[in-house]
Amino acid sequence: MERKIGTTSRGIRCPIIREGDDLADIVVKSVIEAAESEGFCLNDRDVVGITESVVARSQGNYASVDAIAKDVRTKLGGETIGVIFPILSRNRFAICLRGIAMGAKKIVLMLSYPSDEVGNELVSLDKLDEAGVNPYSDVLTEEKYRELFGQNLHPFTLVDYVQYYGDLIRECGAEAEIIFANNPKVILNYTKNVLTCDIHTRVRTKRILKAAGAEVVCGLDDILNESVDGSGYNEKFGLLGSNKSTEDKIKLFPKECGDLVLDIQARFLKETGKNIEVMVYGDGAFKDPVGKIWELADPSVSVANTPGLEGTPNELKLKYLADNDFADLSGDALKSAIEQRIREKGDLAGSMASQGTTPRRLTDLIGSLCDLTSGSGDKGTPIILVQGYFDNYTN
């Protein structure tokens, strides 16, 4: 009988991961046991994804807010620091802000508006229009923001992040001043020592600040990019990709784990005879249509992956073929014609027959699928098995 199932994505349960655990062994055993338990087979080019969180946990890659404070103080001088373009997040940034505030006498917090980098809204575009405010040029004080827009609670968390971040800074013993602007050079009117907290635009922001006369410019990727008094660290990303572990400790993005994915792939080959692709994934790249949040608070979707996951899809758009090239066919004749075209497709770069297929890297697409499948709560499935992703209509 012809196959009736295409791509599937399964959440795989496994033990709670602790520091020092043999993660490769746990991943392989968990997937094989799930296959035996649920009665499915493993195949060549299946994909196993492991969430970055359990990788960092197995590495013991943690740091305290005291370590953040010491590094900030050392690198930015410990006096008045401009902290610009942070995302609005209790899990992702608030605990980092605690450490930053503990390492300074005064924080000038510059928030982008109407929303942060990943879409969390401080004020709606409609309200900006009503108030005649131009977010590309206008700089607002906290007082002016309140006068124009009052209190704005996050639609999901119901947090007033302006108040929350200001209170947090003051609770840590630093003076707080909050402004709203989208031009990074504005912060230089307040201080020449700047910590830029944007994620995906950080290289440009640093370049602009340095060219405009900033004396010290660091990004979150420059804080805890090496160990402080034995703390965890991430050489490439620093605090980027970190999140809250306890009230006084963060879990950092995992360190280099290219060897891990290759090790897992080799163990699967030994145990099953199948060539399985493996990746460590972070946040998926997708946008919530209601809250306008596009999720990607990690610096990358794929932390590490086996070579077979490099590249972009090379796919034909079936509805294009059905409506154009084979508009006069139907039934088995249409099916046969499309199957033949797929078998002969070659490299489709620039082809009209591929228009409408998603032009993204495989790791971003599959990592997003993994993230949506695993969720971020209590599902208990930090391992994802994706099957049939590389199949097409002819398989």
Image (cartoon, rainbow, N blue to C red):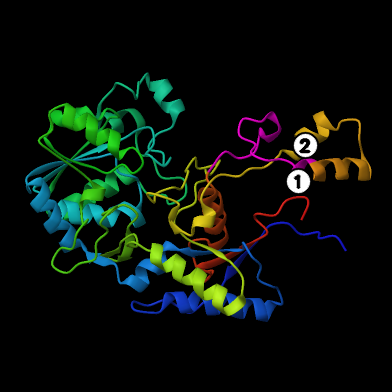
- Which amino acid is tagged 1? Arg
Depth check: give the residue in front, 321 or 221: 321
Mark 1 neighbour density, 10 Å: few (under 14) some (14–19) many (20 or more): few
- Name the residue located 66 percent from the left edge and 80 percent from the top edge: 36
Q: Quadrant of residue 202?
A: top left
Res 343 label: 1
Q: Is residue 87 in sight in this rendering?
A: yes
Query: x, y percentage for residue 104?
Result: 10, 49
- For this view, does 178 lie left or right of residue 286? left
Query: x, y percentage for residue 257?
Result: 38, 64
Q: Is residue 248 in sight in this rendering?
A: no
Query: x, y percentage for residue 259?
Result: 39, 66
Residue 358 inside the magenta-drawn segment: yes
Res 319 label: 2
Q: Quadrant of residue 269?
A: bottom right
Res 57 label: none
Provide the residue span drawn in magenta: 341-360
Q: Secondary structure at mark 1?
A: helix
Q: Secondary structure at mark 2?
A: helix
Mark before the other along the chain sequence, 2 or 1 = 2
Q: CA distance from mark 2 to mark 1?
A: 17 Å
- Name the residue located 38 percent from the left edge and 39 percent from the top edge: 117
- For this view, does 334 lie left or right of residue 197? right
Q: Nearer the viewer, mark 2 or mark 1?
A: 1
- Which amino acid is tagged 2? Lys
- Name the residue located 18 percent from the left edge and 63 percent from the top edge: 227
Depth check: give the residue in front, 50 or 117: 50
Residue 299 inside the magenta-drawn segment: no
